[in-house]
């Protein structure tokens, strides 16, 4: 708002609700008179009193020390702005090392108990961490507070070892952990046991108008939790239930969402139709021996289907449930996937037991889950797989398995109203009604009346044959026909469970093909020596199995043992009880090794989203190539777990993952059950010091940690034994089953070579330095280290002392090179060029390129910096100084180190002859063209290597020309030495300069600085005579097109001496010179041609003064 005062105003804005520390403004004091001031007031939402004032009116007061003041306001607005992110706060709790007198803000100052949290209301970005390996017996952790979507509150674990364990105060009315009116929480990695409820999400204290902290909360996420022994017998001796105050907790449960909805007499009240929580997600958790896995319930208020919104339950298992693996009321948007229960509870409830329960719900999806072995105890009712208790609308129940329950597989009742829009399709039911209360419950599917609506289609129902007489699929077929609007004939009910229960799931082919057949693209199919054999005649050879019965919720993978000689992949397809077709979606492809060796392949069927329900037939394509000799020795659908993956997290930390849920008490947290082996084990002990279960988005992993040692240098293998999955099956054995190989973490390699000693990298313990075993390489010590491997590390090389010899173009990997003062690096790679990511040469350091060179990418070292290093390394011509040099250019050898900047900005530095400007190993017309087009000779203007400055004095003059002519390399092909391999060492013999070129160099050096040209024509005034200046120039130059690297239009190349050799010497001797330097260059060019003529075996240059161009005789 804008504020204006007619008198001096000394005051501020405040609120009738808050003290000054909650409402802050930018109002200056004193105010200028009669000027509009832009005033803003901000609310400190982080203070504890703020939460209790939400939804209450805000009144802003003005107060002033003056009287009778005229105050004007304009543009008043109330805005909501995103507050800056709150500062994260983390509290640590350790029963073994903590002290409640500490501040709890670090592991070293952790609290010991949960008492310090009692008066606290946690704010956004707060984390509460309990120490792994610690236990809090007879305890209850009570927390309160609200996070935000971007800064949730988190309750989790820290340290190593078993998950933090909280055992409850009692199992009758106390929860182990209570979160009061929570919103935006993330909870994971705890072990809660022996309480009425493990985790109680409690919502209370609201107002009848639907306001207050208990309403409109969002996003509670629970994962990687274990709940055990929430199984208090909450029943009277006769099996009835009596609800006791405070009417909150009911069934024992791993997780319970409840509280107290304000609904006194005299309503209706808004509180009973206001959402409490929008967003509850439970994943990757285990519920062992609990009456309810996850449940919800409030007493007394009428049903409201949107009290909870958007609940997701996934990838978890529940045992011991009498009230259901889940039991939900008053929820809209309820999704369940891969949620399994296979062992019911022993509680006696006369009202009945169930493996799953729903009432007063809408928008429900339940799929790919298992409801099995629920118990009906004593004289209680039901014992069913799932109970649609009533008033459930718009629900889908599909691709589930329901089996071996004491009562019916499915129960549909009308409590609080009929169920409508119930779509039950593609489910498989078998062997239910094992122990029904009476003949009325001796059915696979029970519907209470014919007023429900929906569809019951494409389901398979397989009746047991060893149960009470009178067993039927439906309790009333007419009722089910009316109920689901369609004739029930499209469900499969004719086959008994006995007819399918004995089907094989494992084949070893020792007695023949064992029912496998219908081979396609497979010649000579048959059995030989206990193997299916033949030869693939196409790219999709395949064979079908005998009929099988595989519950996909418990058998998650297939082991295939076979050999192939062609191809690189196999494919395993499947048919299900609800879809007897072959489709690409119902298949998994896996890599194979076609070397004729019998190998074991682990095929994770969970890779296919269609792997659900019951598999009734397999089809195996063992290879994808024709001409493969096929041999299949074993095929097994497996119920035990396998070690799916291992990955190094640090040099002493390895994460392993299994393909299915593991039993927390089944040996998977015992370090003695994990063994590390292989060359990459390094200095780690065989067994880790601790195993921790860690929450990840993809599911829990088990983190192995060693307190000392390092694993690096090569792959390592972790093997696990004596670990059980959630169903109690121990892990098998064999490669890929209970072992996994992984790459270790690279480390910084430090090699300290003593003075006067030489080591190869292999002798130093590092035969090959890769990105998997090395980050950086540091050389220390006064001795010599020879890097000769084809190394691939990327972090770079640092030479701090001594000498490093590089004998492989890849020896330095792909990283930068840094050489410190006093250290030296010598490249002995023949005439090769080593690519560097960057080069850092400290003052006093030396780089010896040998006969080779370096390539520096654009944007790393400047041309000026390279030139400075070369000047230092040249050391007056001896090429033995610090910087960049070569030991293969002794004084007087007419060899040097040149450099050139490429069009892409990269710089090449290499051993060279003057003046091979482009450093291509030859001194030819291209280099000469570059020099002449630059026009630097004897001008005094700055010149570089490619422009003729061979001695790095910044000009191209007679001294450089002497070097150039003295090299004797023009147009003689490569001047580079012939070195047998890139690993050759030591200086190589250089070809001697021709006598003519030496004489030419002497003549050029003796010339006066005048416009002269050396003439060798008999008709000229005389050999060596001076020609008159200002004659016609005959050096013919022309631009030549070349393609740009970016693919653009061709550009003109620098002028070059095209067709120089074709110009008659008579025309050259009649040349006209504009600059004195031109004459010298032409003289040099003529002498260079003479060098070529001498190389061709001639005794003199070409004589072109007479027609026909005869040669002069000896």
Image (cartoon, grey):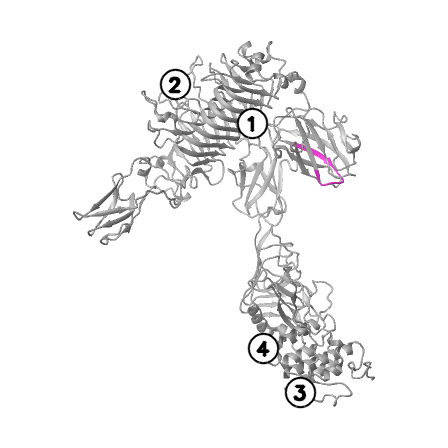
Distance between mark 3 and mark 2 Cα atoms: 123 Å
Q: Earlier in the sequence, mark 2 or mark 4?
A: 2
As for residue 563 lying within the magenta part, the answer is yes
Out of 988 and 802, give the one closest to the viewer: 988
The image shows a total of numbered marks equal to: 4
Q: Does residue 1082 appear in this view?
A: yes
Look at mark 1 in the image and give the residue it sits on. Answer: 367
Instruction: Give the number of the mark in front: 1 or 3.
Output: 3
Q: State whether residue 137 appears in this view.
A: no
Cα separation between marks 2 and 1: 33 Å
Viewer-nearest residue: 1067 or 500: 1067
The kind of secondary structure element at disc 2 is loop
Q: Residue at 58% of width from left, 43% of height from top?
A: 647
Provide the secondary structure element on which disc 1 rests.
Answer: strand
Which contiguous range is marked in magenta? 558-569
Mark-to-mark CA distance, 2 and 4: 101 Å
Q: Mark 3 points at which residue?
A: 1029
Q: Which of marks 4 and 3 is in front?
A: 3
Q: Give the residue pinned by disc 4.
A: 953
* Label 2 packing within 10 angstroms: few (<14), some (14-19), many (20+): few
Instruction: Identify the residue under disc 2.
Output: 243
Label 2 or label 4, whichever lies nearer to me, is 4
Crowding near the residue tagged with mark 1, few <14, some 14–19, many ≥20 C-alpha atoms within 10 Å: many
Residue 206's spot in the image, x, y percent?
34, 29
User: CA gap, disc 4 to disc 1?
Assistant: 82 Å
> Which mark lies nearer to you, 4 or 1?
1
Q: Where is residue 469 in the image (x, y as percent from the top left)?
A: 60, 9
Quick check: marks 3 and 2 in contact, CB under 8 Å?
no
């Amino acid at each position: 708002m804008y504020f204006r005062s007619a008198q001096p105003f000394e005051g501020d804005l405040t609120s009738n609700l808050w003290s000054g520390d909650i409402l802050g403004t930018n109002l200056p004091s004193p105010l200028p008179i009669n000027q509009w001031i832009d005033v803003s007031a901000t609310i400190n939402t982080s203070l504890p009193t703020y939460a209790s004032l939400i939804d209450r009116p805000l009144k802003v007061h003005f107060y002033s020390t003056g009287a009778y003041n005229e105050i004007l306001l304009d543009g008043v607005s109330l805005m909501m702005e995103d507050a800056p992110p709150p500062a994260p706060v983390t509290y640590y709790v350790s029963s073994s090392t903590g002290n409640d007198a500490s501040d709890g803000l670090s592991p070293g100052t952790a609290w010991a108990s949960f008492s310090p949290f009692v008066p606290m209301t946690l704010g956004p970005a707060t984390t509460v961490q309990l120490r792994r390996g610690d236990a809090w017996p007879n305890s209850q952790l009570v927390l309160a507070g609200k996070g935000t979507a971007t800064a949730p509150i988190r309750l989790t674990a820290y340290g190593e070892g078993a998950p933090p364990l909280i055992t409850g105060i009692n199992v009758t009315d106390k929860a182990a952990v209570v979160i009061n009116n929570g919103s935006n929480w993330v909870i994971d990695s705890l072990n809660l046991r022996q309480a009425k409820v493990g985790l109680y999400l409690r919502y209370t204290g609201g107002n009848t108008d639907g306001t207050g902290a208990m309403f409109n909360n969002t996003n509670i996420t629970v994962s990687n939790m274990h709940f055990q022994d929430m199984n208090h017998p909450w029943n009277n001796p006769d099996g009835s239930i009596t609800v006791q105050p405070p009417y909150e907790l009911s069934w024992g449960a791993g997780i319970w969402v409840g509280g107290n909805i304000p609904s006194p007499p005299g309503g209706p009240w808004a509180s009973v139709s206001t959402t409490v929580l929008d967003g509850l997600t439970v994943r990757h958790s285990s519920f062992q021996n609990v009456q309810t896995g996850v449940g919800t319930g409030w007493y007394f208020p009428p049903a409201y289907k949107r009290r909870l919104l958007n609940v997701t339950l996934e990838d978890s298992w529940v045992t011991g449930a009498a009230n259901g693996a889940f039991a939900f009321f008053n929820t809209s948007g309820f999704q369940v996937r891969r949620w399994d229960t296979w062992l019911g509870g022993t509680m006696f409830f006369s009202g009945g037991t169930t493996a799953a329960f729903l009432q007063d719900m809408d928008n429900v999806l339940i799929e790919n889950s298992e409801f099995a072995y629920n118990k009906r105890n004593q004289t209680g009712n039901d014992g069913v797989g799932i109970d649609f208790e009533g008033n459930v609308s718009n629900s889908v129940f599909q691709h589930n398995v329901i089996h071996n329950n004491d009562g019916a597989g499915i129960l549909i009742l009308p409590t609080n109203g009929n169920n409508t829009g119930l779509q039950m399709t593609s489910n498989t039911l078998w062997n239910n009604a094992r122990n029904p209360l009476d003949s009325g419950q001796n059915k696979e599917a029970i519907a209470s009346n014919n007023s429900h609506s929906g569809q019951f289609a494409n389901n398979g129902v397989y009746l047991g044959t060893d149960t009470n007489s009178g067993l039927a699929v439906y309790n009333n077929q007419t009722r089910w026909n009316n109920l689901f609007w369609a004739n029930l004939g499209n469900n499969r009910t004719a086959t008994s469970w006995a007819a399918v229960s004995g089907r094989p799931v494992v084949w070893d082919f020792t007695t023949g093909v064992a029912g496998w057949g219908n081979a396609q693209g497979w010649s000579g199919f048959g059995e030989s020596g206990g193997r299916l054999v033949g030869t693939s005649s196409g790219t999709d050879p395949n064979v079908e199995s005998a009929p099988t019965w595989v519950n996909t919720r418990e058998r998650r993978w297939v082991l295939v043992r076979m050999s192939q000689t062609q191809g690189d992949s196999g494919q395993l397809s499947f048919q299900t009880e609800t879809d007897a077709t072959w489709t690409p979606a119902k298949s998994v492809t896996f890599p194979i090794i076609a070397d004729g060796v019998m190998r074991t392949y682990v095929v994770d069927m969970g890779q296919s989203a269609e792997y659900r329900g019951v598999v009734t037939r397999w089809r195996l394509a063992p290879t994808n190539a024709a001409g493969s000799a096929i041999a299949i020795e074993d095929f097994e659908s497996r119920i035990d777990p396998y070690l799916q993956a291992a990955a190094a997290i640090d040099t002493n930390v390895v994460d392993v993952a299994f393909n299915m849920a593991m039993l927390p008490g089944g040996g998977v947290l015992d370090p003695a059950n994990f063994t590390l082996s292989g060359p990459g084990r390094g200095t780690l002990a065989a067994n880790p010091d601790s195993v921790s279960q860690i929450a990840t988005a993809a599911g829990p992993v088990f983190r192995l940690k060693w307190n000392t040692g390092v694993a690096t240098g090569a792959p390592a293998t972790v093997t696990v034994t004596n670990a059980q999955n959630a169903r109690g099956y121990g892990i098998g054995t064999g490669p890929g089953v209970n072992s996994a190989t992984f790459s270790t973490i690279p480390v910084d390699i430090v090699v300290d070579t003593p003075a006067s000693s030489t080591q190869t990298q292999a002798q130093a313990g590092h035969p090959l330095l890769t990105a998997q075993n090395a980050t950086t390489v540091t050389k220390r010590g006064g001795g010599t280290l020879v890097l000769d491997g084809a190394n691939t590390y990327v972090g770079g090389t640092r030479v701090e002392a001594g000498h490093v010899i590089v004998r492989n173009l890849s020896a330095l990997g792909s990283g930068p090179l840094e050489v410190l003062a006093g250290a030296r690096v010598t490249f002995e790679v023949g005439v090769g060029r080593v690519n560097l990511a960057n080069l850092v040469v400290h003052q006093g350091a030396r780089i010896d390129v040998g006969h080779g060179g370096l390539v520096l990418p654009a944007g790393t070292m400047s041309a000026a910096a390279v030139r400075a290093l070369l000047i230092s390394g040249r050391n007056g011509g001896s090429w033995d100084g610090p910087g960049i040099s070569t030991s293969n250019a002794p004084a007087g050898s007419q060899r040097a180190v040149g450099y050139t900047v490429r069009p892409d900005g990269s710089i090449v530095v290499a051993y060279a002859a003057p003046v091979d400007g482009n450093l291509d190993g030859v001194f030819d017309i291209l280099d000469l063209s570059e020099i002449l087009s630059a026009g630097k000779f004897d001008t005094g203007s700055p010149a570089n290597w490619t422009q003729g400055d061979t001695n790095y004095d910044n000009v191209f003059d007679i001294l450089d020309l002497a070097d150039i002519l003295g090299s004797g390399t023009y147009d003689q092909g490569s001047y580079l030495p012939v070195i047998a391999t890139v690993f050759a060492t030591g200086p190589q013999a250089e070809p001697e300069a021709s006598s003519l070129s030496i004489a030419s160099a002497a003549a050029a050096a003796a010339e006066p600085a005048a416009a002269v040209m050396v003439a060798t024509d008999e008709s000229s005034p005389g050999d060596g005579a001076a020609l008159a200046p200002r004659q016609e120039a005959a050096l013919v130059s022309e631009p030549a097109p070349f393609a740009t690297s970016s693919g653009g239009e061709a550009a003109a190349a620098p002028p070059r001496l095209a067709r120089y050799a074709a110009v008659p010497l008579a025309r050259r001797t009649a040349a006209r010179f504009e600059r004195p330097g031109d004459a010298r260059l032409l003289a040099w060019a003529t002498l260079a041609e003479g060098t070529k003529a001498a190389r061709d075996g001639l005794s003199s240059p070409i004589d072109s003064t007479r027609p026909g161009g005869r040669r002069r005789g000896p």
